[in-house]
Amino acid sequence: MSPRSPDPHRKEHIRRKAAQLFARNGYHGTGVQQLSEAVGLGRGALYHHIGSKEALVEEIVMPRIWEMIAIGETLQAEDLPPHEKVRRLSRAQMRAIAEHLPEWTVFQRDAATLTGPVRKRIFAARDRFERVWAAIIDEGVEQGVFRSLDPIAIKGILGMHNYGYLWIRRRGRLTPDEIADVFCDLLLEGLLSDAS
Amino acid sequence: MSPRSPDPHRKEHIRRKAAQLFARNGYHGTGVQQLSEAVGLGRGALYHHIGSKEALVEEIVMPRIWEMIAIGETLQAEDLPPHEKVRRLSRAQMRAIAEHLPEWTVFQRDAATLTGPVRKRIFAARDRFERVWAAIIDEGVEQGVFRSLDPIAIKGILGMHNYGYLWIRRRGRLTPDEIADVFCDLLLEGLLSDAS
Protein backbone atom coordinates (compact mmCIF):
# COMPACT_ATOMS: atom_id res chain seq x y z
CA MET A 1 0.00 0.00 0.00
CA SER A 2 1.44 3.35 -1.00
CA PRO A 3 1.96 5.95 1.73
CA ARG A 4 -0.49 8.24 -0.09
CA SER A 5 -3.51 5.97 0.30
CA PRO A 6 -4.33 5.84 4.00
CA ASP A 7 -4.69 2.41 5.58
CA PRO A 8 -8.47 1.84 6.03
CA HIS A 9 -7.95 -0.04 9.31
CA ARG A 10 -5.92 2.82 10.67
CA LYS A 11 -8.66 5.22 9.62
CA GLU A 12 -11.36 3.09 11.25
CA HIS A 13 -9.28 2.99 14.43
CA ILE A 14 -8.99 6.79 14.44
CA ARG A 15 -12.72 7.12 13.80
CA ARG A 16 -13.67 4.87 16.68
CA LYS A 17 -11.24 6.47 19.14
CA ALA A 18 -12.38 9.94 18.14
CA ALA A 19 -16.05 8.98 18.52
CA GLN A 20 -15.34 7.72 22.04
CA LEU A 21 -13.46 10.89 22.98
CA PHE A 22 -16.07 13.21 21.47
CA ALA A 23 -18.86 11.25 23.18
CA ARG A 24 -17.15 11.53 26.55
CA ASN A 25 -15.87 15.13 26.45
CA GLY A 26 -17.96 16.71 23.71
CA TYR A 27 -16.71 17.56 20.23
CA HIS A 28 -15.62 21.03 21.28
CA GLY A 29 -14.12 19.67 24.49
CA THR A 30 -11.75 17.35 22.62
CA GLY A 31 -8.47 18.87 21.46
CA VAL A 32 -6.39 17.68 18.50
CA GLN A 33 -3.59 16.99 20.99
CA GLN A 34 -5.84 14.58 22.90
CA LEU A 35 -6.85 12.87 19.66
CA SER A 36 -3.18 12.50 18.67
CA GLU A 37 -2.33 10.85 21.96
CA ALA A 38 -5.36 8.54 21.89
CA VAL A 39 -4.52 7.15 18.45
CA GLY A 40 -0.73 7.29 18.87
CA LEU A 41 -0.07 9.57 15.91
CA GLY A 42 1.61 12.95 15.64
CA ARG A 43 -0.50 15.94 14.64
CA GLY A 44 0.84 15.86 11.11
CA ALA A 45 0.08 12.17 10.57
CA LEU A 46 -3.33 12.63 12.18
CA TYR A 47 -4.24 15.47 9.81
CA HIS A 48 -2.97 13.36 6.91
CA HIS A 49 -5.58 10.74 7.86
CA ILE A 50 -8.51 12.90 8.89
CA GLY A 51 -8.21 16.25 7.13
CA SER A 52 -9.90 18.21 9.94
CA LYS A 53 -11.75 17.67 13.20
CA GLU A 54 -14.99 18.60 11.45
CA ALA A 55 -14.33 16.11 8.62
CA LEU A 56 -13.85 13.50 11.32
CA VAL A 57 -17.35 14.18 12.71
CA GLU A 58 -18.76 13.63 9.25
CA GLU A 59 -16.88 10.33 8.95
CA ILE A 60 -18.15 9.26 12.37
CA VAL A 61 -21.77 10.23 11.86
CA MET A 62 -22.54 9.61 8.18
CA PRO A 63 -22.10 5.80 8.12
CA ARG A 64 -24.59 5.55 10.98
CA ILE A 65 -27.22 7.72 9.28
CA TRP A 66 -26.73 5.94 5.95
CA GLU A 67 -27.08 2.60 7.67
CA MET A 68 -30.49 3.71 8.98
CA ILE A 69 -31.51 5.17 5.59
CA ALA A 70 -30.62 1.87 3.89
CA ILE A 71 -32.53 -0.23 6.43
CA GLY A 72 -35.45 2.21 6.44
CA GLU A 73 -35.86 2.64 2.68
CA THR A 74 -35.63 -1.13 2.12
CA LEU A 75 -38.27 -1.70 4.79
CA GLN A 76 -40.46 1.06 3.36
CA ALA A 77 -40.59 -0.77 0.00
CA GLU A 78 -41.47 -4.14 1.52
CA ASP A 79 -44.90 -5.70 1.44
CA LEU A 80 -45.67 -5.60 5.16
CA PRO A 81 -48.47 -4.07 7.23
CA PRO A 82 -47.57 -0.56 8.44
CA HIS A 83 -47.57 -1.52 12.13
CA GLU A 84 -45.01 -4.23 11.34
CA LYS A 85 -42.86 -1.68 9.52
CA VAL A 86 -43.06 0.61 12.55
CA ARG A 87 -41.90 -2.24 14.80
CA ARG A 88 -39.02 -3.21 12.54
CA LEU A 89 -37.82 0.35 12.07
CA SER A 90 -38.05 0.98 15.81
CA ARG A 91 -36.03 -2.17 16.57
CA ALA A 92 -33.41 -1.35 13.94
CA GLN A 93 -33.00 2.14 15.36
CA MET A 94 -32.63 1.05 18.98
CA ARG A 95 -30.15 -1.64 17.92
CA ALA A 96 -28.14 0.88 15.91
CA ILE A 97 -28.00 3.31 18.85
CA ALA A 98 -26.93 0.56 21.28
CA GLU A 99 -24.30 -0.86 18.92
CA HIS A 100 -22.78 2.49 17.97
CA LEU A 101 -23.42 4.55 21.08
CA PRO A 102 -20.45 6.96 20.79
CA GLU A 103 -21.27 7.64 17.13
CA TRP A 104 -24.96 8.27 17.87
CA THR A 105 -23.99 10.54 20.77
CA VAL A 106 -21.86 12.66 18.46
CA PHE A 107 -24.67 12.64 15.89
CA GLN A 108 -27.47 13.58 18.28
CA ARG A 109 -25.58 15.96 20.49
CA ASP A 110 -22.67 17.54 18.62
CA ALA A 111 -23.77 17.72 14.98
CA ALA A 112 -26.08 20.66 15.74
CA THR A 113 -23.16 22.73 17.05
CA LEU A 114 -21.31 22.49 13.72
CA THR A 115 -21.62 25.08 10.99
CA GLY A 116 -21.07 25.10 7.25
CA PRO A 117 -21.15 22.28 4.68
CA VAL A 118 -20.56 19.38 7.12
CA ARG A 119 -23.58 20.38 9.17
CA LYS A 120 -25.59 20.78 5.97
CA ARG A 121 -24.72 17.31 4.70
CA ILE A 122 -25.39 15.64 8.06
CA PHE A 123 -28.76 17.38 8.39
CA ALA A 124 -29.75 16.52 4.81
CA ALA A 125 -29.06 12.83 5.51
CA ARG A 126 -30.92 13.04 8.82
CA ASP A 127 -33.92 14.58 7.03
CA ARG A 128 -33.89 11.73 4.54
CA PHE A 129 -34.05 9.23 7.38
CA GLU A 130 -36.86 11.19 9.07
CA ARG A 131 -38.81 10.96 5.81
CA VAL A 132 -38.74 7.17 6.09
CA TRP A 133 -40.55 7.35 9.43
CA ALA A 134 -43.00 9.88 7.95
CA ALA A 135 -43.63 7.71 4.87
CA ILE A 136 -44.34 4.59 6.94
CA ILE A 137 -46.78 6.48 9.15
CA ASP A 138 -48.42 8.07 6.08
CA GLU A 139 -48.83 4.65 4.50
CA GLY A 140 -50.72 3.48 7.58
CA VAL A 141 -52.94 6.56 7.49
CA GLU A 142 -53.69 6.02 3.77
CA GLN A 143 -54.60 2.39 4.45
CA GLY A 144 -56.92 3.53 7.24
CA VAL A 145 -55.10 1.55 9.93
CA PHE A 146 -53.42 4.56 11.57
CA ARG A 147 -55.25 7.63 12.75
CA SER A 148 -54.22 10.86 11.08
CA LEU A 149 -51.90 12.98 13.20
CA ASP A 150 -50.19 16.30 12.68
CA PRO A 151 -46.73 15.77 11.08
CA ILE A 152 -45.10 17.08 14.29
CA ALA A 153 -45.90 13.64 15.73
CA ILE A 154 -42.91 12.36 13.71
CA LYS A 155 -40.63 14.60 15.77
CA GLY A 156 -42.08 13.03 18.90
CA ILE A 157 -41.58 9.49 17.61
CA LEU A 158 -38.02 10.29 16.58
CA GLY A 159 -37.32 11.91 19.94
CA MET A 160 -38.60 8.82 21.74
CA HIS A 161 -35.97 6.78 19.89
CA ASN A 162 -33.07 9.21 19.40
CA TYR A 163 -33.01 10.23 23.03
CA GLY A 164 -31.91 6.65 23.74
CA TYR A 165 -28.30 7.70 23.25
CA LEU A 166 -28.51 9.26 26.71
CA TRP A 167 -29.59 6.19 28.65
CA ILE A 168 -29.26 2.99 26.63
CA ARG A 169 -26.65 0.53 27.91
CA ARG A 170 -25.03 -2.29 25.97
CA ARG A 171 -25.95 -4.87 28.57
CA GLY A 172 -28.95 -3.18 30.12
CA ARG A 173 -32.02 -4.81 31.69
CA LEU A 174 -33.79 -4.90 28.32
CA THR A 175 -32.35 -5.63 24.87
CA PRO A 176 -32.72 -2.94 22.19
CA ASP A 177 -35.47 -5.07 20.59
CA GLU A 178 -37.34 -5.29 23.88
CA ILE A 179 -37.07 -1.52 24.37
CA ALA A 180 -38.39 -0.97 20.85
CA ASP A 181 -41.30 -3.30 21.57
CA VAL A 182 -42.28 -1.30 24.67
CA PHE A 183 -42.12 1.92 22.64
CA CYS A 184 -44.17 0.38 19.82
CA ASP A 185 -46.83 -0.97 22.19
CA LEU A 186 -47.14 2.56 23.53
CA LEU A 187 -47.08 4.21 20.09
CA LEU A 188 -49.48 1.79 18.45
CA GLU A 189 -51.96 1.03 21.24
CA GLY A 190 -51.65 4.15 23.41
CA LEU A 191 -51.68 4.51 27.17
CA LEU A 192 -55.44 4.28 27.62
CA SER A 193 -56.56 0.78 28.52
CA ASP A 194 -59.51 -0.82 26.77
CA ALA A 195 -61.40 -0.62 30.03
CA SER A 196 -61.16 3.18 30.21
CA MET B 1 -25.53 47.35 47.74
CA SER B 2 -22.11 46.31 48.93
CA PRO B 3 -19.57 45.30 46.30
CA ARG B 4 -19.43 41.84 47.87
CA SER B 5 -23.07 40.97 47.10
CA PRO B 6 -23.36 40.63 43.31
CA ASP B 7 -26.15 42.52 41.58
CA PRO B 8 -28.89 39.96 40.80
CA HIS B 9 -29.81 41.67 37.51
CA ARG B 10 -26.19 41.57 36.40
CA LYS B 11 -26.08 37.90 37.29
CA GLU B 12 -29.28 37.17 35.38
CA HIS B 13 -27.83 39.01 32.38
CA ILE B 14 -24.65 36.89 32.54
CA ARG B 15 -26.71 33.73 32.88
CA ARG B 16 -28.84 34.49 29.85
CA LYS B 17 -25.89 35.52 27.64
CA ALA B 18 -23.94 32.44 28.69
CA ALA B 19 -26.90 30.16 27.96
CA GLN B 20 -27.16 31.64 24.47
CA LEU B 21 -23.43 31.20 23.82
CA PHE B 22 -23.34 27.66 25.20
CA ALA B 23 -26.44 26.73 23.19
CA ARG B 24 -24.89 28.05 19.98
CA ASN B 25 -21.29 26.84 20.34
CA GLY B 26 -21.53 24.11 22.95
CA TYR B 27 -20.42 24.43 26.55
CA HIS B 28 -16.92 23.21 25.74
CA GLY B 29 -16.81 25.35 22.60
CA THR B 30 -17.34 28.57 24.57
CA GLY B 31 -14.27 30.17 26.06
CA VAL B 32 -14.17 32.41 29.12
CA GLN B 33 -12.80 35.14 26.87
CA GLN B 34 -15.92 34.92 24.67
CA LEU B 35 -18.13 35.06 27.76
CA SER B 36 -16.26 38.13 29.03
CA GLU B 37 -16.78 39.95 25.75
CA ALA B 38 -20.45 38.99 25.47
CA VAL B 39 -21.30 40.35 28.93
CA GLY B 40 -18.88 43.27 28.80
CA LEU B 41 -16.89 42.29 31.89
CA GLY B 42 -13.22 41.50 32.42
CA ARG B 43 -12.25 37.95 33.36
CA GLY B 44 -11.75 38.91 37.00
CA ALA B 45 -15.15 40.57 37.33
CA LEU B 46 -16.76 37.68 35.48
CA TYR B 47 -15.27 35.12 37.87
CA HIS B 48 -16.39 37.28 40.79
CA HIS B 49 -19.97 36.90 39.53
CA ILE B 50 -19.98 33.30 38.35
CA GLY B 51 -17.29 31.40 40.24
CA SER B 52 -16.57 28.98 37.39
CA LYS B 53 -17.85 27.99 33.97
CA GLU B 54 -19.25 24.81 35.48
CA ALA B 55 -21.03 26.72 38.25
CA LEU B 56 -22.58 28.81 35.51
CA VAL B 57 -24.06 25.71 33.86
CA GLU B 58 -25.64 24.78 37.16
CA GLU B 59 -27.12 28.28 37.49
CA ILE B 60 -28.45 28.08 33.93
CA VAL B 61 -29.95 24.61 34.18
CA MET B 62 -31.20 24.24 37.75
CA PRO B 63 -33.92 26.94 37.72
CA ARG B 64 -35.41 25.25 34.63
CA ILE B 65 -35.45 21.77 36.20
CA TRP B 66 -36.83 23.12 39.48
CA GLU B 67 -39.54 24.97 37.60
CA MET B 68 -40.65 21.66 36.09
CA ILE B 69 -40.39 19.82 39.42
CA ALA B 70 -42.59 22.48 41.07
CA ILE B 71 -45.19 22.36 38.29
CA GLY B 72 -45.05 18.57 38.15
CA GLU B 73 -45.28 17.83 41.86
CA THR B 74 -48.15 20.31 42.29
CA LEU B 75 -49.98 18.69 39.40
CA GLN B 76 -49.28 15.23 40.75
CA ALA B 77 -51.09 16.12 44.00
CA GLU B 78 -54.13 17.56 42.26
CA ASP B 79 -57.48 15.83 42.01
CA LEU B 80 -57.56 15.31 38.24
CA PRO B 81 -57.90 12.24 36.02
CA PRO B 82 -54.48 10.82 35.02
CA HIS B 83 -54.94 11.56 31.32
CA GLU B 84 -55.57 15.21 32.19
CA LYS B 85 -52.40 15.28 34.30
CA VAL B 86 -50.47 13.83 31.35
CA ARG B 87 -51.81 16.58 29.10
CA ARG B 88 -51.01 19.37 31.55
CA LEU B 89 -47.51 18.10 32.25
CA SER B 90 -46.85 17.67 28.54
CA ARG B 91 -48.02 21.22 27.81
CA ALA B 92 -46.00 22.68 30.67
CA GLN B 93 -42.88 20.91 29.45
CA MET B 94 -43.23 22.01 25.82
CA ARG B 95 -43.93 25.59 26.98
CA ALA B 96 -40.87 25.53 29.24
CA ILE B 97 -38.62 24.27 26.42
CA ALA B 98 -39.93 26.89 23.98
CA GLU B 99 -39.65 29.73 26.50
CA HIS B 100 -36.15 28.83 27.69
CA LEU B 101 -34.68 27.21 24.63
CA PRO B 102 -30.99 28.04 25.26
CA GLU B 103 -31.24 26.83 28.86
CA TRP B 104 -32.94 23.57 27.85
CA THR B 105 -30.34 23.05 25.14
CA VAL B 106 -27.55 23.33 27.70
CA PHE B 107 -29.50 21.03 30.02
CA GLN B 108 -30.27 18.34 27.46
CA ARG B 109 -27.04 18.46 25.51
CA ASP B 110 -24.18 19.69 27.65
CA ALA B 111 -25.00 18.56 31.20
CA ALA B 112 -24.04 14.95 30.37
CA THR B 113 -20.52 16.05 29.37
CA LEU B 114 -19.86 17.53 32.83
CA THR B 115 -18.23 15.57 35.62
CA GLY B 116 -18.18 15.85 39.40
CA PRO B 117 -20.66 17.40 41.83
CA VAL B 118 -22.37 19.76 39.35
CA ARG B 119 -23.28 16.84 37.10
CA LYS B 120 -24.45 14.89 40.12
CA ARG B 121 -26.74 17.66 41.34
CA ILE B 122 -28.20 18.29 37.87
CA PHE B 123 -28.88 14.58 37.33
CA ALA B 124 -30.43 14.18 40.79
CA ALA B 125 -32.87 17.02 40.00
CA ARG B 126 -33.56 15.56 36.56
CA ASP B 127 -34.34 12.18 38.15
CA ARG B 128 -36.76 13.85 40.53
CA PHE B 129 -38.60 15.39 37.58
CA GLU B 130 -38.63 12.05 35.75
CA ARG B 131 -40.27 10.51 38.81
CA VAL B 132 -43.19 12.93 38.42
CA TRP B 133 -43.89 11.53 34.94
CA ALA B 134 -43.52 7.99 36.30
CA ALA B 135 -45.86 8.69 39.24
CA ILE B 136 -48.58 10.14 37.00
CA ILE B 137 -48.40 7.14 34.65
CA ASP B 138 -48.41 4.75 37.64
CA GLU B 139 -51.47 6.47 39.05
CA GLY B 140 -53.29 5.83 35.79
CA VAL B 141 -52.24 2.18 35.83
CA GLU B 142 -53.43 1.78 39.44
CA GLN B 143 -56.78 3.33 38.54
CA GLY B 144 -57.06 0.91 35.62
CA VAL B 145 -57.30 3.68 33.03
CA PHE B 146 -53.76 3.22 31.65
CA ARG B 147 -52.39 -0.08 30.47
CA SER B 148 -49.35 -1.32 32.32
CA LEU B 149 -46.08 -0.72 30.46
CA ASP B 150 -42.47 -1.44 31.28
CA PRO B 151 -40.91 1.56 33.12
CA ILE B 152 -38.63 2.15 30.11
CA ALA B 153 -41.70 3.70 28.47
CA ILE B 154 -41.04 6.77 30.68
CA LYS B 155 -37.70 7.26 28.90
CA GLY B 156 -39.58 7.19 25.60
CA ILE B 157 -42.17 9.72 26.79
CA LEU B 158 -39.44 12.00 28.13
CA GLY B 159 -37.46 11.68 24.90
CA MET B 160 -40.52 12.65 22.90
CA HIS B 161 -40.68 15.91 24.89
CA ASN B 162 -37.04 16.67 25.71
CA TYR B 163 -35.89 16.24 22.12
CA GLY B 164 -37.97 19.33 21.34
CA TYR B 165 -34.99 21.52 22.21
CA LEU B 166 -33.61 20.53 18.78
CA TRP B 167 -36.53 21.63 16.64
CA ILE B 168 -39.02 23.79 18.56
CA ARG B 169 -39.25 27.41 17.42
CA ARG B 170 -40.62 30.34 19.38
CA ARG B 171 -43.00 31.31 16.58
CA GLY B 172 -43.39 27.96 14.88
CA ARG B 173 -46.41 26.62 12.99
CA LEU B 174 -47.84 25.15 16.20
CA THR B 175 -47.81 26.60 19.72
CA PRO B 176 -46.16 24.53 22.46
CA ASP B 177 -49.64 23.62 23.75
CA GLU B 178 -50.69 22.40 20.31
CA ILE B 179 -47.52 20.32 19.99
CA ALA B 180 -48.18 18.80 23.40
CA ASP B 181 -51.73 17.97 22.36
CA VAL B 182 -50.50 16.10 19.27
CA PHE B 183 -48.04 14.16 21.45
CA CYS B 184 -50.73 13.38 24.01
CA ASP B 185 -53.22 12.20 21.39
CA LEU B 186 -50.52 9.85 20.16
CA LEU B 187 -49.48 8.74 23.66
CA LEU B 188 -52.99 8.27 25.00
CA GLU B 189 -54.87 6.91 21.99
CA GLY B 190 -52.05 5.32 19.98
CA LEU B 191 -51.47 5.23 16.24
CA LEU B 192 -53.92 2.43 15.49
CA SER B 193 -57.27 3.74 14.37
CA ASP B 194 -60.51 2.37 15.82
CA ALA B 195 -61.22 0.82 12.44
CA SER B 196 -58.04 -1.27 12.45
Image: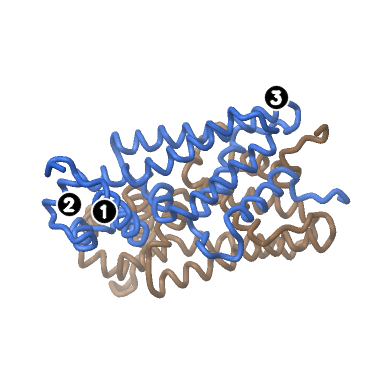
Chain colours: A brown, B blue
The answer to whether residue B195 is above or below residue B149 is below
Quarter holding the C terminus of chain A is: top right
Q: Is residue A166 left or right of residue B106?
A: right
Mark 1 Cα-neighbour bin, 10 Å: few <14, some 14–19, many ≥20: many
Label 1: which secondary element = helix
Quarter holding the N terminus of chain A is: bottom left
Q: Of the residues under marks 1 and 2, which one precedes in the sequence? A: 1
Mark 3 Cα-neighbour bin, 10 Å: few <14, some 14–19, many ≥20: few
The chain carrying label 1 is: B
Q: Which mark is residue B142?
A: 3
Estimate the x, y position of residue B115 in percent, counting from the top left. 30, 40
Estimate the x, y position of residue B98 in percent, counting from the top left. 49, 55
Q: Residue at x 52, y 35 (%)?
A: B130
Estimate the x, y position of residue A73 in percent, counting from the top left. 66, 65
Mark 2 Cα-neighbour bin, 10 Å: few <14, some 14–19, many ≥20: many
Label 3: which secondary element = helix
Q: Nearer the viewer, mark 1 or mark 3?
A: 1
Do we see residue B1 in this rendering?
A: yes
The residue that disc 2 covers is: B46
The residue that disc 1 covers is: B14
Q: CA distance from mark 1 to mark 2?
A: 8 Å
Q: Nearer the viewer, mark 2 or mark 3?
A: 2
Label pair 2/3, CB-CB below 8 angstroms: no
Residue nearest the viewer, comparing A174 with A11: A174
The answer to whether residue B170 is above or below residue B142 is below
Q: Of the residues under marks 1 and 3, which one precedes in the sequence? A: 1
The answer to whether residue A184 is above or below residue B138 is below
Label 2: which secondary element = helix
